Amino acid sequence: MIELANIRLHLEPKGDRVGDSDFAFSGWVVADRPIAAVWLPEARSIRLTTCDRPDVESVFPDLIATGFAGECPAYILNSNHLRIAVQLGEQILEVDHPVPAALPRPSLAERLLASIQLRWLSLREKMPADASERFGFTLRRHFIARHLRRGVFQRHHIDALLSDFARSMPEAHFLQIGANDGLTGDPLYPLLQRPETHWRGVLVEPVAHLFAQLVERHGQNPALRLEQAAIGESDGNTLIHRLETAPTDSIWLDQIPSLDPELFQRNAAQFGQAGGAIVREEVQCYTVATLLRRHMMTRLDLIVIDAEGMDWRILRQFDLRNLEPQLVLYEHQHLSAEARDEAHQFLANFNYGWVEAPEGDTLAWRLP
C-alpha cells in the first residue's frame, strides 16, 4: 500500500508479468473525499473499471473507497512501477506503485508440459479426503509454477500459496506472532474474512493500542484467541520500543516496534523519525513453550512470525518435529546473514524446504 498526501492506494497484480506481455491488475484507493476518477496518466485512452469496495470501507470507516481494475500495455509500463492518477474534486494526484519485475517467457515445450502437469494435479487435489494430502498436490502445483518462473518467488506468490492453502485446509490451526492491528501488511486478514475458512488460531501482539485494534477486528470471532504479549527467550516482563504516533501519521510507523532497541532505532531512521519521541512500554513476555501451554496448542498447520528482528530467536524455539506445521512464514529482512543461514539449517534439520522472497519474508514448507 502506498500513502500519498490524503490517499492510500493498493495495487494487486492479476498473475505474473511474463516477457513483454501487458500487465493486468486490480486495486483500491481510499481518501477523505469522494474519488472522481482513477486512470493511467500515461495511457489516457485506456479506461479503468471502477467499483464500490464496501470491504475496504469497513476497514477504513472514516474514508471513502473506490476499487479499480484494468490492463496496462507493456510499452508504457516502467520496469518497476505503474503510474496511477487519482482525482479528488479538482485535485489530481499521481502515484507510482511498485510492480513485479517481468519474468522470462518459458519455451512452448515447457508451457505445454506444465499445462498437462498442472491439470493433473488440479484433478488430484479434489480427490483426497485428508486435508494434508490435498495440500501436498497444491504445493506441487506451486513448485511447477515456480520452476516456470526460473525460481522467482515474490510476496504475491506467497499470498497465492497461502490462499490455496486456505482452500485445501479450511479447518487449519494457526499461530500468528506479531499480529499488529490484524490488517496492515497482514497476509492472513483476507483469508480469515472468507466464509469458507474455518480456521482456529491464536494471534499475539504486545503493543497496547495495536492489540486494541486487533480486538476490535477479531474479538468477536470465537475461533480466534488473542494474546497481548511479546514472545521472547524467557518468561516475565520486558520492554518494547515504539514511536509515539498520531492518527494522521503513516500507518507504517506502527509496524516497527521491537524488543531490540538498536534495530528499532535503525528502522525509525529509515522512516525519517530518528529523533522522534520514543515510547518504552513494559509488556508481558512468554517463551514459545509457555504460549503453547497457555493455549493448549498441540497441533499447528501454519506458523506466521513477524517480530521485527526477533524472528529467528522465536522460530528456533518451535519443536517442528512434533508440531509438523505444513507452512512456516517469517520475516528475514532484519536478520543478519549468519542468523538467516542458521534459520535455513534449522528448517532443513526438520525436513523443511524454504524460499526467501525479495520483499523480506521466508516461506518454508514441510517436505514429504
Image (cartoon, rainbow, N blue to C red):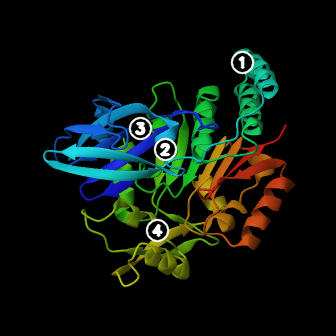
Q: What distance separates the C-alpha of mark 4 from that of mark 2?
A: 32 Å
Which residue lies under the disc numbered 4? 256
Between tags 1 and 4, which lies in front? 4
Q: Residue at x 59, y 71 (%)?
A: 235
Q: Is residue 61 visible?
A: no
Between tags 3 and 1, which lies in front? 1
Q: From this viewpoint, which residue is outermost toward the left?
A: 90
Which residue lies under the disc numbered 1? 129
Up/down of 180 relative to 183, above or below: below
Identified by mark 3, the residue type is Asn
Between tags 4 and 2, which lies in front? 2
Which residue lies under the disc numbered 3? 221
Which residue lies under the disc numbered 2? 77
Q: What distance separates the C-alpha of mark 1 from that of mark 4?
A: 42 Å
Identified by mark 4, the residue type is Ile
Between tags 3 and 4, which lies in front? 4
Instruction: Determine whether the residue tagged by mark 2 lies in a helix, strand or loop.
Output: loop
| Few, some or many residues within 10 Å of mark 4 (<14, 14–19, 20+) | many
Q: Is residue 228 visible?
A: yes
Which of the two labelled residues, at mark 1 and mark 4, occupies the earlier sequence position? Answer: 1
Identified by mark 2, the residue type is Leu
User: Residue 41: x, y in percent?
Assistant: 33, 43
